[in-house]
């Protein structure tokens, strides 16, 4: 058979044609010298060999003699031309035809890949990846809570105004919004694992850096970039994990993965509760650099991100993504690794991975590597970056083409309405509780009218008091604190203030004569319409000073902890029912139940009632979030999955920014607008979600 194969025979001859060449019946360069007589009538060795080789052959199997001189057979030329023809034609074919062929290939790959994942089974490999990606999702949950917990301490540490506090609260969501779109798009071009590593590295680096910086501007910048990094992780995590799951496991296990977001909230609440009140857990370097306990809390909150980053180095790239870009062999090796890992864990190491070939879609885009001799290094990198960003932008636009437009627009509305109501109320609940606390605090205020004090030394704390029309002569205020104290229309004459710390303390319409202020934080803005006559301010306190008893409010930590813990039942129910009742019913039902819960907020007139309704709302709405994550992954093809998820998640963060701003502005004014806005948004989004296509039974395209 080997001799009959003319291609092999030809290859052997061509490889050695320089040594042996058949010419006129002799081997060139070889003369027999064995001493035997060779007559002309006696058949030569060449003729014997020729007769042996050709014995039993048809004429069609005869070797073309011209090939001995390296001249190809005319039939071979035609065959080679036929093989080359499609590759040449691709350059002249319409892009629409190529895309149609690619879509056909993708459909075949989707069904074959589903069968391969079922053969690999669900076992140790998926559970390992589950915990690695869960830590990344946990880091996202932590990021949402960090700023809210450190604000009470950071505002005193960095002298933040109300506008600065508001900006710090929103800047994280702004970074998440940009990161979701940018890094989600890059994950469809560069790979899930690589982009997730970049995302987590950015978050970890700038989160750690933010704990050490002292200035407000630099701290704001670090939290912005940190948010950008962690914002990109969410779309990548769900796209990455879904591509290792079979159809029957996908909805359930993606819902279990969502539990790590809840665990992140619980972790942040517990760490804040146990670290921030311990003001001594820090150090100082001179008078300029202070590392207080809230900075220790920021450091600890970076641990889940760092742990996920380290563990991710040992995980493989998504084989579905590799097949999408034509890397068949790498994808096959990873799928074999998944199969062997699961089979060994099940005690069946003898099972063989039976897949030998996997369909790869036709590659439409060609990437040409820029040679090192072309331009300078930064020019080459600029071309690479601009080309990649152009491809990401094209992917974004493709999500709005006729194939995906309606699904994308409906999902965008559902994501936005869900985010507007959820994040708006999540901020509104603590603000309302704080407002109720302040109302109760103000109701206990003590009022002193027309008091006259002279030659007295104040060395204790004054709290929640109003002093009107008082006269203070030759008094000393030494080493004391003013908390929520107001002096109105009062006279201070020849008084002495030393080492005084104040919080929400003001002097209004007062007359201050021959008074000395030494080492105090009674700055100019605390004297409203006052007359200062022959008064001296010496060595004012620099920076801001924490007031631990007031600022470290345990109730706020408790509210966040209970709110995070309350989603546990909703997570369990959604995971168990996701593949049974479907994604659409889960979204619609959860959003409508959450809207009903909003109306009960009209009866929340106490702190305990507000905490209870918050837990009920969070528990009811979490199922909609989980189903949204699952259906977004399943509605888009592999080369658009992370991009589409990033766009929708970025829109979600934009809704969070609007919700925070709108709902917070009505605290203390009215409850009607926030409640009606949240409930109407949930009803509208829930009804629209029922028109989305069900994806429970479809393979991952």
Image (cartoon, grey):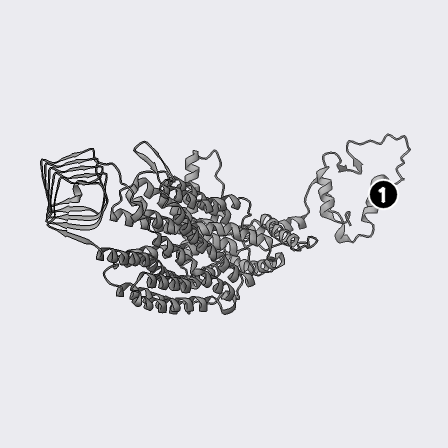
In the foreground, 645 or 128: 128
Q: Would you say 258 lies left or right of 144 here? A: right
The front one of 37 and 251 is 251
Residue under the point 81% across and 44% down: 50
User: Can you see residue 406?
Assistant: no
x then y, percent, for residue 516: 15, 35
Q: Residue furthest front?
A: 455
Question: Does residue 76 lie above or below 630 as drawn?
Answer: above
The residue at the point 36 percent across, 40 percent down is: 280
Q: Position of residue 697 (x, y in %)?
A: 53, 66
Q: How many marks?
A: 1
Q: Which residue is mark 1?
A: 48
Q: Position of residue 606 (x, y in %)?
A: 30, 62
Going by the image, does 459 lie left or right of 566?
A: left
User: Taking the image as drawn, is residue 523 in sight?
Assistant: yes
Residue 563 lies in what quarter of the image? bottom left
């Amino acid at each position: 058979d080997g001799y009959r194969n003319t291609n092999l025979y030809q290859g052997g001859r061509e490889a050695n044609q320089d040594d042996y060449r058949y010419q006129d019946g002799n081997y060139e360069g070889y003369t027999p010298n064995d001493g035997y007589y060779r007559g002309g009538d006696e058949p030569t060795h060449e003729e014997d060999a020729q007769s042996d080789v050709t014995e039993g052959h048809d004429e069609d199997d005869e070797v073309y003699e011209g090939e001995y001189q390296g001249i190809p057979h005319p039939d071979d030329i035609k065959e080679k031309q036929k093989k080359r023809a499609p590759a040449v034609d691709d350059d002249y074919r319409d892009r629409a035809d190529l895309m149609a062929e690619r879509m056909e290939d993708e459909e075949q790959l989707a069904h074959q890949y589903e069968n391969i994942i079922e053969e690999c089974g669900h076992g140790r490999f998926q559970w390992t990846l589950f915990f690695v990606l869960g830590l990344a999702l946990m880091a996202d949950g932590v990021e949402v809570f960090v700023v809210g917990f450190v604000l009470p301490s950071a505002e005193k540490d960095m002298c933040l105004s109300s506008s600065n506090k508001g900006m710090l609260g929103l800047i994280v969501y702004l970074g998440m919004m940009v990161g979701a779109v940018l890094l989600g798009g890059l994950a469809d071009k560069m790979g899930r694992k690589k982009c997730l590593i970049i995302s987590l590295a950015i978050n970890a680096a700038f989160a750690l850096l933010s704990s050490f910086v002292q200035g407000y501007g630099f701290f704001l910048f670090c939290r912005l970039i940190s948010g950008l990094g962690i914002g990109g992780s969410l779309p990548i995590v769900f796209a990455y994990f879904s591509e290792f799951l079979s159809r029957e496991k996908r909805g359930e296990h993606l819902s279990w993965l969502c539990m790590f977001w809840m665990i992140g909230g619980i972790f942040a609440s517990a760490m804040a509760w146990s670290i921030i009140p311990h003001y001594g857990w820090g150090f100082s370097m001179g008078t300029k650099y202070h590392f207080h306990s809230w900075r220790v809390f920021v450091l600890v909150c970076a641990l889940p991100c760092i742990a996920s980053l380290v563990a991710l180095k040992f995980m493989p790239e998504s084989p579905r993504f590799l097949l999408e870009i034509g890397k068949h062999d790498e994808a096959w090796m990873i799928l074999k690794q998944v199969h062997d890992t699961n089979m060994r864990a099940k005690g069946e190491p003898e099972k063989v991975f039976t897949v030998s070939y996997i369909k790869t879609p036709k590659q439409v885009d060609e990437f040409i590597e820029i040679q090192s001799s072309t331009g300078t290094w930064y020019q080459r990198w600029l071309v690479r970056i601009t080309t990649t960003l152009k491809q990401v932008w094209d992917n974004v636009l493709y999500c709005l083409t006729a194939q995906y437009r309606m699904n994308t627009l409906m999902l965008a509305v559902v994501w936005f309405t869900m985010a507007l109501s959820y994040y708006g109320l999540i901020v509104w609940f603590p603000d309302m509780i704080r407002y109720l606390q302040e109302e109760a605090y103000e109701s206990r205020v003590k009022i002193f009218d027309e008091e006259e004090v002279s030659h007295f030394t104040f060395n204790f704390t004054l709290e929640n008091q109003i002093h009107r029309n008082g006269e203070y002569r030759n008094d000393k205020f030494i080493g004391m604190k003013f908390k929520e104290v107001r002096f109105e229309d009062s006279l201070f004459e020849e008084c002495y203030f030393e080492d005084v710390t104040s919080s929400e303390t003001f002097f209004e319409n007062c007359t201050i004569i021959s008074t000395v202020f030494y080492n105090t934080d009674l700055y100019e803005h605390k004297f409203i319409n006052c007359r200062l006559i022959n008064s001296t301010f010496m060595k004012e306190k620099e920076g801001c000073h924490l007031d631990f008893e007031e600022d470290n409010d345990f109730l706020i930590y408790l509210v966040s902890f209970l709110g995070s813990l309350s989603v546990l039942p909703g997570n369990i129910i959604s995971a168990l029912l996701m593949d049974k009742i479907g994604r659409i019913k889960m979204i619609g039902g959860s959003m409508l139940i959450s809207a009903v819960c909003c109306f009960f907020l009209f009866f929340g007139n106490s702190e305990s009632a507000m905490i209870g309704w918050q837990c009920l709302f969070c528990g009811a709405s979490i199922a909609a979030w989980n189903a949204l994550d699952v259906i977004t992954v399943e509605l888009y093809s592999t080369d658009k999955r992370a991009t589409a998820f990033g766009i929708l998640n970025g829109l979600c963060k934009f809704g969070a920014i609007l919700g925070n701003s709108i709902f917070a502005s009505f605290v203390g004014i009215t409850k009607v607008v926030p409640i009606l806005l949240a409930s109407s948004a949930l009803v509208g989004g829930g009804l629209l979600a029922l028109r989305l296509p069900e994806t429970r039974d479809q393979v991952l395209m």
